[in-house]
Amino acid sequence: MRKPTLLVSEDDPDIVELLRYNLEREGYRVLEATDGERGLAEAMRPSLERIADLAANIAERAVSFASQSQLAVPPRIREMVETCARMLRQSIDSFVRGDADLARRICAEDVQVDRANRLIIQELLEAMHREPACIDQAVELISVSKNLERIGDHATNIAEDVVYLVEGDIIRHRSKK
């Protein structure tokens, strides 16, 4: 199993080098930050890269679905697209502006995205039972919904990091209400 990435933020370059040397020997990836913002930007990069991968997967599913289009796209999927795109935009805005209040609102929206994903999957499973001929199309839409839900999770992760950067409050592991 790959060890996590650690962010080292220290003014003394000798201490930074000592930490880097020892942590890298143990298999950790070490990011050095001269300030918290640069460090957070580096920490956000994997989430943004993963979001790009998920968006590419959604595009592939959309092409495949469009070529078969016997099943209507559930309206909730369109709503999820809009919500996740807004969450991502706002999570980046909250970072740029150092806006912890906006970041917290984004975190609260993740519950709605999770709920929409569950309802979409339920709706599509019911459609598959009613019309077995649409199973392949429904599976494509389930994949889209799951990928959108993951995009919402990554936008939330960025927002949680912003809250930590601005307020020093770790909200990542708190249960969703």
Image: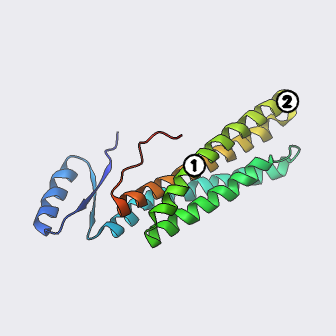
Q: Residue at x 20, y 51 (%)?
A: 23
Residue beneath label 1, please?
Answer: 110
Q: Distance between the residues labelled 2 and 1?
A: 32 Å
Q: Which residue is drawn at 33% across and 57% down?
A: 168
Q: What amino acid type should be assigned to the residue bearing mark 1?
A: Asp
Q: Kindly give the residue lying farthest to the top in the view shown.
A: 129
Q: Look at the image and tell me whether residue 145 can be seen.
A: yes
Viewer-nearest residue: 85 or 141: 85
Q: In this view, does 163 lie above or below 38?
A: above
Residue 142: give x, y in percent of width and height.
Answer: 70, 41
Pointer 1 local density, CA inside 10 Å: few below 14, some 14–19, many at least 20 = many
Quadrant into which the N terminus falls: top left
Q: Which residue is drawn at 49% across and 60% down?
A: 103
Quadrant into which the C terminus falls: top right
Q: What amino acid type should be assigned to the residue bearing mark 2?
A: Pro
Q: Residue at x 63, y 50 (%)?
A: 148
Residue 156: give x, y in percent of width and height.
Answer: 51, 53
Residue 168 is left or right of residue 125, and the answer is left
Q: Which of labels 2 and 1 is toward the front?
A: 1
Q: Could you say which quadrant of the image residue 84 lies in?
A: bottom right
Viewer-nearest residue: 149 or 68: 149
Residue 33: give x, y in percent of width and height.
Answer: 28, 67
Residue 108 is left or right of residue 118, and the answer is left
Residue 133 is left or right of residue 146, and the answer is right
CB atoms of marks 2 and 1 within 8 Å: no
Q: Look at the image and tell me whether residue 50 can be seen.
A: no
Residue beneath label 2, please?
Answer: 132
Report the coloring of the rendering.
Answer: rainbow
